[in-house]
Image: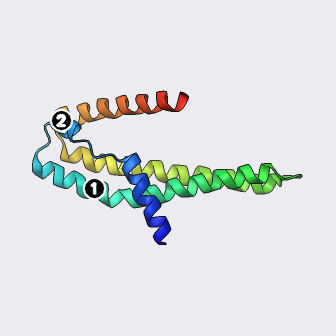
Amino acid sequence: MLKLTGILIFLSVLLFPADGKILEKLGITPDQNTQIEKIMTEYRVPILKLVIQIRQEQLAKQYELLADEPGLDKIKAMINKQVALESEKEYLEIERDQKIRKQLTKDQWMKFLQYRHMLKGQSEKNRKK
């Protein structure tokens, strides 16, 4: 369990970096910051656990595909499990974001969405390199 906790902490830093610049750009008040941090903390570990489970399913599927005679029923079950995990993760992210949204003004929320879109674009560029 200690190893898993270390992995979760490492992933949380990668997936949820603390960016003071975004807080400054959004004009987040100290109270808003406290509330948002509570929300992020509430969702961080459950989402990261799902990320790990999704990766495990992907690896298990790849391993099965390397077998001399891959079990198609087994692969189908793995795909279904992976899709279910991805759906659960997406729902938790939406739920988290809606709680964050309630802490922000409309203008702050729109700026937050723009910033996140920009970060996703940078992340995709880095993956293509």
Q: Is residue 73 above or below residue 20?
A: below
Q: Residue 50: x, y in percent? A: 50, 57
Q: What residue type is labelled 2?
A: Leu
Q: Which amino acid does label 1 sit on?
A: Ile
Q: In this view, does 81 lie above or below 117?
A: below
Q: Is residue 115 above or below residue 91?
A: above
Badge 2 crowding class, 10 Å Cα cut-off, few under 14, some 14 to 19, many 20 or more, is some
Total label count? 2
Q: Residue 42: x, y in percent? A: 32, 60
User: Which residue extends farthest right?
Assistant: 68
Q: What colour scheme does the image use?
A: rainbow
Mark closest to the chain's N terminus, 2 or 1? 2
**Marker disc for residue 26:** 2
Relative side of 95 to 65, left or right = left
The residues tagged by marks 2 and 1 sit, at their Cα atoms, a distance apart of: 17 Å
The residue lying at 44 percent from left, 66 percent from top is 5
Relative side of 84 to 97, left or right = right
The residue lying at 54 percent from left, 27 percent from top is 129
Quadrant of the image occupied by residue 101: top left
Q: Nearer the viewer, residue 62 or 71?
A: 62
The residue lying at 54 percent from left, 28 percent from top is 128
Quadrant of the image occupied by residue 53: bottom right
Q: Residue 70: x, y in percent? A: 84, 52
**Marker disc for residue 117:** none
Q: Residue 107: x, y in percent? A: 18, 32
Label 1 sits on a secondary structure element that is helix
Label 2 sits on a secondary structure element that is helix
Q: Mark 1 points at which residue?
A: 39
Quadrant of the image occupied by residue 44: bottom left
Badge 1 crowding class, 10 Å Cα cut-off, few under 14, some 14 to 19, many 20 or more, is some
The residue lying at 49 percent from left, 65 percent from top is 4
